[in-house]
Image (cartoon, rainbow, N blue to C red):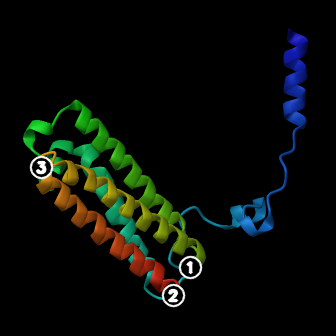
Amino acid sequence: MLVLIATALAQAAAFTPPALPARWGLEPSAVAARPLLPTPAQADLPRGMYGYTAALATGRVALGVAPIVAPARSAALLGFPEAHDNATSRLMARLFGVRDIGLGALTMASAHDTTTLRRAYLFNAAIDIADTSMIAIPLIADDGIDEAAWRSVGFALGGCSLWLIGAWWTTR
């Protein structure tokens, strides 16, 4: 048994992963040269775009932090009935919050060039469109949360518009 373990460890130590295509920009020298969160001076973006990106990413993170630190208040602001405030809904809201924090962080980490940033903008817009389509389900089913659903649609479509403006801006 020890021989098998020693053999497996020796093979793992000798393993060399295959090289990634250079166009991915993930070779060690390129990754080491690129900061995780670039500063405005390090970002190769048109004037004002870094600030726009930081504002959108901060808004996305704030939208994610809110249900984590104050789930009942966040639900009330969106118009969800107080009767729907339970442990399950708070857990789902917190999972939604973690997702939004991750999307905001991804957006800021993508702020080093317009091509990568455009992908992040479009990804965020796609998430907001998907959210809107999921919000349509309780509206169609008449689940009694119309006020909250319509407010959520407003947030999702408003955010989607801002992400699409950013994606358009990267082409200028």
Question: From what the image shows, is residue 32 above or below residue 137?
Answer: below
Q: Which mark is residue 76?
A: 3
Whole-number angstrom distance, CA of label 1 to CA of label 3: 38 Å
Whole-number angstrom distance, CA of label 2 to CA of label 1: 8 Å
Q: Position of residue 47 (x, y in %)?
A: 47, 88
> In the rendered structure, which amino acid carries the disc numbered 1?
Thr
Query: As rendered, which of 114 and 10 lies closer to the eye?
Result: 114
> In the rendered structure, which amino acid carries the disc numbered 3?
Ala
Counting labels gives 3
> In the rendered structure, which amino acid carries the disc numbered 2?
Pro
Q: Which residue is drawn at 44% across and 58% down?
A: 103
Q: Which of marks 2 and 1 is nearer the N terminus?
A: 2
Question: From what the image shows, is residue 79 above or below residue 85?
Answer: below
Graded by Cα atoms within 10 Å as few (under 14), some (14 to 19) or many (20 or more), the crowding at tag 3 reads: some
Q: Residue 19 carries which label?
A: none
Whole-number angstrom distance, CA of label 2 to CA of label 3: 39 Å
Disc 1 marks which residue? Answer: 114
Question: From what the image shows, is residue 138 above or below residue 150?
Answer: above
Q: Quadrant of the N terminus?
A: top right
Question: From what the image shows, is residue 126 above or below residue 95?
Answer: below
Disc 2 marks which residue? Answer: 46
